[in-house]
Image: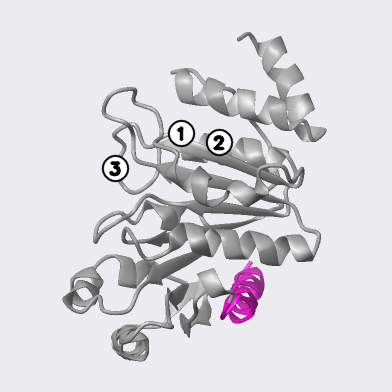
Amino acid sequence: MDAFADQELLKEIQSGNRQALAKAITTIENSTVGIEVDNVEPTAQVLGITGAPGVGKSTTVDAIIKFLRKKNLSIAVLAVDPSSPISGGALLGDRIRLADHFTDPKVFIRSIATRGHLGGLSASIKQVLKLIQLANFDFIIIETVGVGQSEVEIMRVADTVCVVLAPGMGDGIQAAKAGLLEIGDIYLVNKSDREGASETKQDIEKSIALSMLKTNKGVAWTPPVLLGSMQLGVGVVEFMTEVENHRRVRNLGK
């Protein structure tokens, strides 16, 4: 694709053409050159959702979309999926859980394959984010692959990082202290209707209390630990309230 064609495609994206956006993302994923996107003013808040496999990350994303759509806000979702060992493409597991939103014109959902990139994201994520910022969404949600202790790259691209956990993780929480439990701006103990949720919440709060306050350009922020059952819609309002609180704290530090 030549420079002129790139500029035409970028104009289409800026005007709200979702097909053009999808085409540009595919070009970035399949090309070693990519598309030059310069001077993009970030307008959308980027929310990162991360956590171990099976804690309910996609269910959390689904609950967030429903909440934001009730406010008539537009959302782009980048669901980073493990790569297929055969095709190299994304396994598309997250798209299945978000199927209710496929026909909504104000929701754009794209699965992106890791293609062997470590850190929980894909190598092309920063360039894809620039494209999506150009498309003027209100919110951008990045859902990482199921991660462990060392996959913390999401903290470098998201404005607010939410670490989703589940009851009964036990020693898994201790093991994560040097990784996931250091990068979160908000911690969500999902599936709170299950036994052990309160104990898990207390364990995380103790871990945070032993560490220094997180700061965002000099503004102190103590990560809240929330209980919720995203599949049941429990705790979504409280979670989104903390997302907004964190946005305000970040803006104070600018």
Which amino acid type is marked by label 3? Leu
Q: Secondary structure at mark 1?
A: loop
Residue under label 3, please give it: 118
> Whole-percent x and y of residue 162?
47, 67
Which amino acid type is marked by label 2? Val
Choose top left, top right, bottom left or bottom right for residue 195: bottom left
The span picked out in magenta is 234-254
Residue under label 1, please give it: 124
Determine contact: label 1, label 2, CB under 8 Å: yes
Residue under label 2, please give it: 128
Task: Specify the quadrant that holds the C terminus.
Answer: bottom right
Task: Specify the quadrant that holds the N terminus.
Answer: top right
Q: Would you say residue 81 sits in the magenta stretch?
A: no
Q: Is residue 102 left or right of residue 79?
A: right
How far apart are the two marked residues, 3 and 1, measured between alpha carbons?
A: 12 Å
Q: Secondary structure at mark 3?
A: loop
> For the point 48% across and 64% down, which residue is it?
161
Foreground residue among 128 and 165:
165
Foreground residue among 171 and 184:
171
Labels 3 and 2: the sequence-earlier one: 3
